[in-house]
Amino acid sequence: MHKPGKEITIYDIAKKLNVSAATVSRSLNDHPGVNKITKKKIIDTARDMGYSFNAFASNLRTKRSNTIGVIVPRLNSNFMSDVIAGMEKMANEANYNIIISQSLETMKKEISNAKTMYNNRVDGLLVSLAYDTNNIEHFEPFINRGIPVIFFDRVYEHDKCPNIHIDNFKAAYDITTHLIEQGCKRIVHITTTERRSVYADRFNGYKKALADNQIPFSEKLIIDNDLSVQGGMDAAERILKMPTLPDGVFSANDISAITCMQELKKKGISIPDDIAFAGFNNDPSACIIEPNLTTVNYKGYEMGEVAARVLISHLVNNYDLQLTHSLILRHDIIIRGSSLKIPVLDPR
């Protein structure tokens, strides 16, 4: 008689039915070489005896967990929600599970997330880096073991890790050029001190647009903060203390742009007449603020789909990751009321 508390094995089932353990194993794994009646009898007996197919033990043998790890800076952003929805669609279609963790914008937590993912034996990793991540040593154990790591949105250059992002330099160049075309000559740029990756590219795109339009760059028009709600309020305070008010603001994200606009409006600043505004990300709140915010749009859902598709293609079909080392997705400039100093002429 089977002792309570002891885990049922294929040998217990084999003994009860007087068949070989190999026949039990083949039946439980739905092997076509086993007689259908025998297979049904074995499966029914296994169920009656409380046998639990040990997926983890099987995965150790096949070295697959059918799980993808995802590390993001924050989950409470509309963009990241869209990204994860795109990833989950692709993962579900390919019968993969997703484990999601957030670094809360710190490298320290990101290192902890990576260790957890590694210990959970994920088959691959999709990562958008924290603000202050300045090296990726914590992902080296994955790379060394041949576990694919793909960076998306906030990326890091590594010859074995593909990047999926938009052309942040070009997007920032385009939106700054739009402000200049609206007559802006003193354009504040709200960015983050951690000028790596996406924010460095947006900063450099802003600078290049000024240079190409013969507008001198001034460090006094750069506001460094963490691009949070509070950061936008602090930026408004800084702007109001400037000896000469700017006539345009380009924020590296929408949240800072929106809260900065709100604070300036409270102080009687007219937008866009006094100061034109542009943001980045096309958060839903960009259409709630009055006037609506001009911004850069790029599709999070598409980015999530592409990142997951590349990873799963590699895992399932052994697709060479080096072939898609850097995928650049399309962006659009969405022009709304916050930047339109020059009235649009009625075509009638």
Image: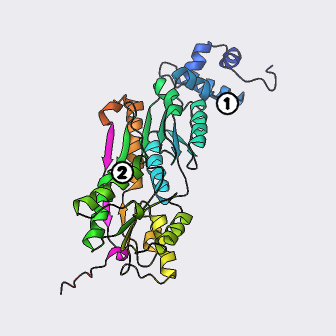
Badge nearest the viewer, 2 or 1: 2
Amino acid type assigned to the residue bearing label 1 in the image = Arg
Q: Residue at x 67, y 17 (%)?
A: 17
* Residue 209: image location, x then y, percent: 27, 60
Label 2 element class: helix
Tell me where residue 307 appears, x and y as whole percent: 40, 43
| 48 shown above or below 10 | below
Residue drawn at x 35%, y 67% is 187
Of residues 244 and 322, which is closer to you in this image?
Answer: 244
**Image quadrant occupied by the C terminus:** bottom left
Say which of 38 and 135 sits in front.
135
Residue assigned mark 1: 47
Q: Which residue is mark 2?
A: 201
Check residue 337 for magenta coloring: yes
Q: Residue at x 31, y 36 (%)?
A: 324
* Magenta range: 325-341
Q: Residues under labels 2 and 1: Cα distance? A: 58 Å
Give the structural element (helix, strand or loop) at label 1: helix
As drawn, 93 above or below 234: above
Which amino acid type corresponds to the residue marked 2 in the rendered image?
Asp
Q: Residue furthest front?
A: 243
Q: Is residue 345 left or right of residue 303?
A: left
Q: Farthest bottom residue? A: 348
